[in-house]
Amino acid sequence: MKSEAHEPLFTAVLATPHVGAGAFIIMDALASVGSLWEYLHGEEPGRRYFLPRLLSVDGEPYSDLHGLVIQPHGALGDYPEPDIIIIPEMLLDPWRPLPNSYAPIIDWICSAYQRGALVASLCSGSMLLAETGLLDGEEATSHWAFCDAIARRHPDIRFRKERILVHAGEGHRLITAGGFSSWHDLLLYLIGRVAGPEEARRTAKLFLLSWHDEGQLPFAALTVGRRHEDNAVAAAQLWVADNYANPNPVAAMAARSGLTERNFLRRFKRATGQSPMEYVRTLRIEEAKQLLETTAMPVDDIAIEVGYVEPSAFRHVFRKLVGVTPSAYRRRHLWPAPGQQHA
């Protein structure tokens, strides 16, 4: 989608009723492309590549969830043919349907996409993009904690919670980005696609942006709660939360449930979305992550602490679920002590 025309691409940043701060960060960065680098180096401004504008349903001022007054540049109906649409993160419960007030926004997005617009969502903004139906049959991502909830409402979308960016649709005009700080990746991708890699590199240097090459897994909590009403399974989850390091905890859970092993396995999978062994494994790795973050315990000792007899097996499972080795994870999440300088 590299722009060959001299006119900047009209980029609609949606001011939804539950918009977050990402909308304004994105607008600042896009508006700088082609001018800020030149200004700081005493050069003549170059061409503008993006014309970011904040749009809402009616264009009227409104207060966000923090009480701050937001003044959009205009109404959606005044701009039926944007080149790019960006859906920022939204401060909403992903387990609940979107309010009816989003219906005109959904219609506008669909219409603009049919006219050739590129549509990108950031973080929980994928909730809105999913509601348009444009992602049906496609791959997508979102904040790692939201993927399961959105997938439950939209089973035709294949969510890749480990990914930071996913391109989909005709001409790769549907872009979904992961958790909030993946605005770095989304921005650099869009700038590179429209203005070329050199402008993307300049923007990265100006705003200290970087690609999240390792994806979302090193940041994700593996045991995101899934709501269910199976009391037998809930009791098993409560017990194993304190006993995951025991030998053969799955058999113990089944025995304590009073169900046959086959029935317990089936009900556990239906209620949680994981097999009991997968659930135990994620509990063990999540505890290992906490120990890596907060203690100096050797990795081999952590493996034994969380229930692994063989440290090599622990390392293999950790790398598979988290995307990095235990030592690399510890380095990434090692916080400086109070008063200690941070690089």
Image: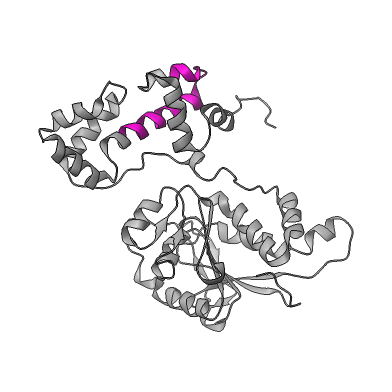
Predominant SS along the magenta part:
helix
Q: Which residues are magenta?
A: 280-302
Picture coordinates of residue 216, whole percent (x, y): 51, 45
- Residue 143 visible to an observer of this rendering: yes
Q: Nearer the viewer, residue 23 or 214?
A: 214
Image height of 110 relative to 140, above or below: below
Residue at 57% over, 61% down: 23
Quarter in which the N terminus is drawn: bottom right
Lateral position of residue 150 relative to residue 263, left or right: right
Picture coordinates of residue 104, whole percent (x, y): 42, 77
Q: Nearer the viewer, residue 178 or 100?
A: 178
Does the stretch in magenta take in 29?
A: no
Lateral position of residue 99 relative to residue 123, left or right: left
Picture coordinates of residue 192, whole percent (x, y): 69, 61
Q: Nearer the viewer, residue 158 or 52?
A: 158
**By what rule are the colours in the image chosen?**
one colour
Residue at 70% over, 72% down: 3
Picture coordinates of residue 2, whole percent (x, y): 69, 69
